[in-house]
Image (cartoon, rainbow, N blue to C red):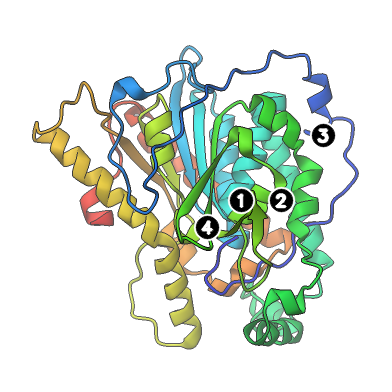
Amino acid sequence: MDDGRARTSGKKEAKAMTPDSPRETAKAAGDRAAVRVQAGRDAPPSPEHVPPPAPAQQVDQESVGAKVPPGAKGVNLALQGGGSHGAFAWGVLDRLLEDRRIHIEGVSAASAGASNATVLAYGLTVGGKEGARKALSEFWELIAKKGASSPLQASWIDKALNNRTLSFSPSFAIFDFLSRMFSPYEINPLNYNPLRDTITSIVDFEVLRQRCAVKLFLSATNVRTGKIRIFRDREITPEVVLASGCLPFLFQTIEIDGEGYWDGGYMGNPALYPLIYSAQSRDVIIVHINPLHRDNIPKTAHEILDRVNEISFNSSLMREMRAVAYVTSLIDNGELDSKTHHRMLIHSIRNEGYMKALSVWSKLYTERSFLHELREVGRETADRWLAENFDALNNRSTVDLKPLFL
């Protein structure tokens, strides 16, 4: 999970799954016909540079998630990472899943967004929309439970100030100092990552790989080359989720097929091009975690660190949106044929006012009350967005790209 210098404290303890839990329902769903996942629909290489939208005829017509139920509108989701702030996306997803008019075709995600995306995809696979809502709820409840047993706890000063951070926590101060002086190979030699137990207690990865109900794309950063790697639904394992959220000052490099990977947010937070190339729907709804704009110049050390984190983890998205805006202008000017090239419809669900008020350190804060507050803010934000913008889906963008990204 991303956070510039943020340390992801606590994901919740793995608990025994109840008979009606999302993972247990996989067996009951075992006789369902597996959704055929078309081979050869990966985005073309050139991960360092954002490719232009693919010609329409290259899109796989039979791919997973492309069949939209009558009366619904197909969309794709792009989920940012942001530590515990990912609970905001939990709320957004919960509200979107509640709306029968919304059909999710594909999801691209990085860092904390990768955890949300994986749990969402698995819940949809074994239990439909209600299964996805339940799986996401279980996941974040486990995050809160794990955080409650973590040695990194908010101090009485933090609680009195209601700052929702670990700013005055002695244990966090010690950990922060050690992590700046020593690598995770030295302070975490056993490479313990609580997210592994948490995600595997919710998701049956074998079921997910065999018949994922949506197109799922998780990004990670190749440590040697600095390039982005997109893992697709049939490649998703616990290691892929861990790689997408691997902060190198907290956890040892995640190795997959002989390559080392760090947090996907460094190179794609999230990556949009897999959705451009592989999805039928032209609509991409970006669920923002990191604020794009700040009203004032940061002055304190914490404010500077916070802004550096936001700029770093928004930079790849900014680059991709510039490419989308450029191709859109070519289509508008008649320089590209709109019949053979996709005109992407971009949407943005964000609450910058609320997120701006949160400190970078609150990305480490996993108190249950805070996670549920984020969830409710996410639900309310998505509810307002749907009321204002649902009619635009499948018709036009609801984001003016130039003032926001150029």
User: Are the residues flagged by discs 2 and 1 in contact, CB closer than 8 Å?
Assistant: yes
Quarter holding residue 83: bottom right
Q: Amino acid at mark 4?
A: Asn
Mark 3 or mark 1: which comes first in sequence? Answer: 3
Residue at point 57% right, 50% down? 113
Mark 4 or mark 2: which comes first in sequence? Answer: 2
Q: Amino acid at mark 2?
A: Trp
Residue denoted by label 1: 375
Residue denoted by label 3: 21
Determine whether the residue tagged by mark 4 lies in a helix, strand or loop: strand
Residue 367 falls left or right of residue 349: right
Position of residue 290 measured from the top left corner of the image (x, y, whole percent): 46, 61
Mark closer to the observer (4, 1): 4
User: Are the residues flagged by discs 3 and 1 in contact, CB closer than 8 Å?
Assistant: no
Location of the C terminus (image quadrant)? bottom left
Gap in angstroms between the C-alphas marked 4 and 3: 35 Å
User: Are the residues flagged by discs 4 and 3 in contact, CB closer than 8 Å?
Assistant: no
Location of the N terminus (image quadrant)? bottom right
Residue denoted by label 4: 222
Gap in angstroms between the C-alphas marked 2 and 1: 10 Å
Position of residue 59 measured from the top left corner of the image (x, y, whole percent): 38, 23
Mark 4 or mark 1: which comes first in sequence? Answer: 4
